[in-house]
Image (spheres, coloured by chain):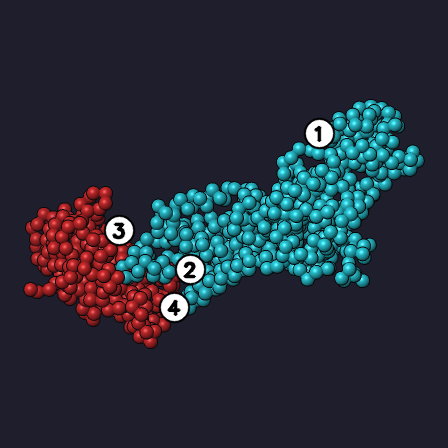
Amino acid sequence: MRLFEFWLNHGSEFLSAIARHLALVLAATGIAVAVGVPLGVLAYRRPRLGNPLIGLANVVQTIPSLAMFGFLIPLPVIGGIGAKAALIVLTLYALLPVMRTTVSGLKAVDPSVREAGLAMGMTDRQLLFQVELPLARSAILAGVRVATVVGVGTATIAAAIGAGGLGEYIFRGVASVDSTVILAGAIPAAALALLADFLLGKTEQWFSPERSSRKSSKFVLATAAGIVALGLLIGGLLWSERSAGSVVIGSKDFTEQVILGELMAQLIEQNTTIKVQRKLNLGDTLVCETAMRAGDLDLYVEYTGTALTAVFKQSVLLDSNEVNARVAASYAATGRTMLPPLGFNNTYVILVRGDDARRLNLKTISDAAKLSQNWRAGFGSAFLDREDGYKGLVQAYGLKFAESPLAMNLSLTYRALAERQVDLISGDATNGLIAKLDLFALEDDRRYFPPYHAVPVVRTETLNRHPELRALIERLAGKVTDQEMRQMNYEADVERRDASLIVKDFFSRHHELFSMTPTP
Amino acid sequence: MSEFAIEFDRVTFRHAGGATILDEFSLAIDSGETLALVGRSGMGKTTILKLINRLLLPQAGTVRIEGRATTDWNPIQLRRRVGYVLQEVGLFPHMTIGRNVAVVPHLENWPESKINPRVDELLELVGLEPTKFRDRFPRELSGGQRQRVGVARALAADPPILLMDEPFGALDPLTRAEMHREFHRIQSQVRKTIVCVTHDMGEAFALGDKLGVLAEGKLAALAPPNEIARSNNPEVKIFLDALPRLNDGGTER
């Protein structure tokens, strides 16, 4: 039932996801037919040229789709993120079935019929268009059918590179561990595949050589050409989708990132006339980084510690100012501008129960270290292993526990703490459960944990194009506190609210962010 | 110098594999003549037909059509002047009977107003009622009816030459006999230069004004039927001796 509610609540978004999904598949299939049928004819007429082509298409088919999207991201022109790369991948996948069935359909034409055509004095062209292709028609259509059905499935994965479509729900659902959202995308995708299969099956019958008389033959050809042309047109639109002057905002594929992306998008939409394009849920840091370097992405929110180590491959630094300075310099050197931190620091935090904190007046880890010898601790196994995790922590603060800490699944540690099975855990600073379970984050008063401040990163070229953006985004500096981010994550992960609504509420709490058009 | 409709001048044809099919083969066919060529399977009967409409070219020698070597003809133009009835008929399964018959007129860009009456005329000529058959598809016809359509299609653009490759081989004996009678009726109306190849001496006698017997890549005999029947040529005798048996088991092929 939650599923129907979800669809109802996301009506227009849901419909546009379906439309976009269909557009991607139709365009890719259209291009595949426009390219694959001539290639099939070539392979049939000139096997020496054509067979390697088919071999190549075969190889392409064996590449897992996610890997193919990955390969394409850093490539110029055809690569990047968004519909363009998705079209390329979907077309490549659709090409093989279309080429194959074209060749086999042509090969299946009765040799005596072909000879009759030649003996009648048909030219190669006439033989192809009047005899061979019409007879191969239903075979080719069977290939188109396979290509379309496979395409509907593959297109869901295209959401990973920001091409949109129903896959967006699937990825969103996976990120927030919400099966309802996964199903909201998966069920219509499956239904689309079945529907496409059914309709094309009908068309296949209708196209079969015996059913089409002389008049309808031209009609059928015109219809097919029309559909292919429509596919090409949609493909062209999708290809050049990025409208001039618009700003593309991205995010990685977890809750906090999607909220931050939405935050940036609404900030710009509410205060300027700049057109904003959202490419949220884009896989990991690497996807966002490469997309930005390729110019497909104008803006996303990164964490300073992640930028330092994962993007710029430097070693861990503890001092926030130094990290900020280094990261800002590295971004500046690569055509990006790092804007001031939003405020919160999504680093490791040491958590205790809220009532303990209030009762014992605990504020900092140092406070806790004085009492910890009677406590039990639970940590995620990664935290226990890392150099900058448990070992360094106990050294930095002289922490001692009643027994050696429990290694447990990270997401279980929050509940274990709330249920008094352990007394101290490590967690993510901005996890929504901190608020939900009334946990208290102790201040890292000795600055042990490296900083992971959230910073908007914008392509410098984009800032030059829209100079007003800098001041606008700078207004957010320091506005998103740990507490505030935690609350928003909580609303998304626990209350299952939409990022757009959560962000709207954020802005209504912060009227001061709107100087030009205050929200009502 | 008299001009033959079709002339083979010391033609040699070898398959890519190397087997020599025709060895300095010579033959001349007068305009309006019906030549029936008899030979065993693999003796190059179909090859001869394909050399005439330039589906094949000889390795040596010359094939002349209306006095011009086939190598000098534009193959497309040549083929449109030479009707061809295939062994397997080879009707286009995706086209109606009417459209099948109209293929060459369409290729020749005849106006529709001329094509339609021509199709009906031809269907009538081969004994198929136009209103009944025009809009049917080949798969809806019997073997004999399809063969008639094959003949109509070959005659559509009124080509001066007609090639027939075992045209009635796949039919039952009664239908075949009927087709032989029809053949003579049609030929008396259209007066084409016809080359018909068959492995069946009986059919050759039934169809040809003149009979040719193929052996070892050459023409073993070429004469009117009554002379062939009396021939002492051993190659010819083989076929003549086979006649009664073939008639007994005529449906075998």
> Label 3, on which residue?
B253
**Residue at mark 2 to residue at mark 4: CA–CA distance:** 14 Å
C-alpha distance separating marks 1 and 2 = 68 Å
Above/below status of B200 relative to A369: below
Residue at position x 87%, y 31% in the image? A367
- What mark, if any, has residue A41 been given in the picture? none
Can you tell which of label 4 and label 1 is closer to the viewer?
1
| The chain coloured red in the image | B
Q: Residue at x 35, y 53 (%)?
A: A110
Q: CA distance from mark 3 to mark 1?
A: 86 Å
Q: Provide the secondary structure element on which disc 2 rests.
A: loop
- For the colour cyan, the matching chain is A
- Mark 2 Cα shell of 10 Å, populated few (<14), some (14-19), many (≥20): many
Q: Secondary structure at mark 3?
A: loop
Q: How many angstroms separate mark 3 from mark 2 (CA)?
A: 30 Å
**Neighbour class for label 4 at 10 Å: few (<14), some, many (≥20)?**
some
Residue A404 placement: quadrant: top right
- Per the image, label 4 sits on a secondary structure element best described as loop
Discs 3, 1: same chain: no
Asked if the residues shown at circle 4 and circle 1 are in contact, with their CB atoms under 8 angstroms apart, the answer is no
Q: CA distance from mark 4 to mark 1?
A: 81 Å
Secondary structure category for the residue under label 1: loop
Quick one: label 4 or label 3, which is nearer the N terminus?
4
Name the mark nearer the viewer: 4 or 3. 4
The spot of residue B48 in percent (x, y) is 19, 54
Chain letter of mark 1 equals A
Please tell me which residue is depicted at 76% across the width and 36% down the height of the picture. A348
Q: Amino acid at mark 4?
A: Asp
- Residue B201's quadrant in the figure? bottom left
